[in-house]
Amino acid sequence: MLEAKGFAVGLRIEHPQEFINQQQWGKWAGTPGLEAADYFLTYQDAASGRGVYTFCMCPAAMLLPAHHGRGTSDQCMSAYRRDSARANAAVVVTVGPDDFIAQQPLAGISLQQQLEENAFIAGGGNYMIPAQPARDFVGGGKVAQGIPACACLPGAVHADLGKLLPDFLNEPLKRALMHFDKKMPGFIDAGTLFGVETRTSSPVRIKRNAHDFHAVGVKGLIPIGEGSGYAGGIMSCAVDGMRAAFLLIRADFAF
């Protein structure tokens, strides 16, 4: 049995790594041996009740598109040496089953597909990544000069990212960026946004019994980790797998 579950979608923001280093390390920025800085920011939007947070922050990284047919979503990669001049992170807004027009288990996947197709079209239909200065996104306008230099493959094209996401995501995202700018002055002016970030976690869950983790109605099938809807990252996947393993070990000893 499947059920819809909450997840998060939004955009990805890129900054010069030097800006992040200055914000996080202060006067120690540039000290030999000090690694590229990262960050984690959260915001609770009072107007909508939604949480907004940064996710999968990649210091000194390259932005890469993930292609899904006629869809594009953002991914990132930090090289081992972390010596790239730019850093990026997802900025995502929580989405719940009540947000889906169709109240059925795969409604969240349909939302993902729609947003990714929007990004594909905005990128020109050739898998370029749609991008916009964060200041213009927050202000709701576009600029003629396009976008700053960025670290992404195969490249980026200027687009109005406000048209990629529905208003119930756009508005909390804008308020969150303004809040983050107070925490890290210059976060907006130094940032470039890219669309879209949709693959934070699975929007669907395979139901399982709480006492033995077997799938509801399918004895012997044990759904675990991110794809089955029980984790949202590397560490939570590992923990969920360990819990399942311990349950299986205890069940073996019970015999």
Image (tube, rainbow, N blue to C red):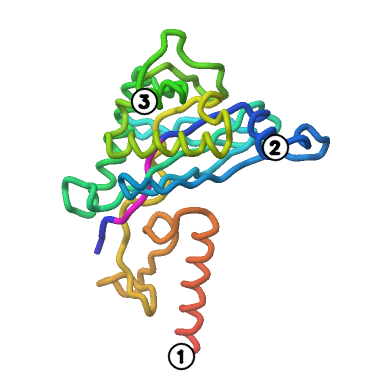
Residue visible at 42% across and 16% down in the picture: 158
Q: How crowded is mark 3: few (under 14 residues within 10 Å), some or many (20 or more)?
A: many
Q: Where is residue 160 in the image (x, y as percent from the top left)?
A: 35, 21
Q: Label 3 vs label 2: CA separation?
A: 28 Å
Q: Which of marks 1 and 2 is nearer the N terminus?
A: 2
Residue 223: mark in rendering: none
Mark nearest the camera among 1 and 2 is 2
Give the residues drawn in magenta, as a range: 5-10
Q: Check disc 1 and report the residue beneath it.
A: 254
Q: Check disc 2 and report the residue beneath it.
A: 36
Q: Residues within 10 Å of mark 1 (few under 14, many from 20)?
A: few
Q: Are marks 1 and 3 in contact (CB under 8 Å)?
A: no
Query: Residue at the right extreme?
Result: 32
Q: Position of residue 132 (x, y in %)?
A: 43, 21
Helix, strand or loop at mark 3: helix
Q: Check disc 3 and report the residue beneath it.
A: 161
Q: In the rendered structure, does residue 130 fall within the stretch colored magenta?
A: no
Q: Are marks 3 and 2 in contact (CB under 8 Å)?
A: no
Q: Is residue 70 above or below residue 210?
A: above
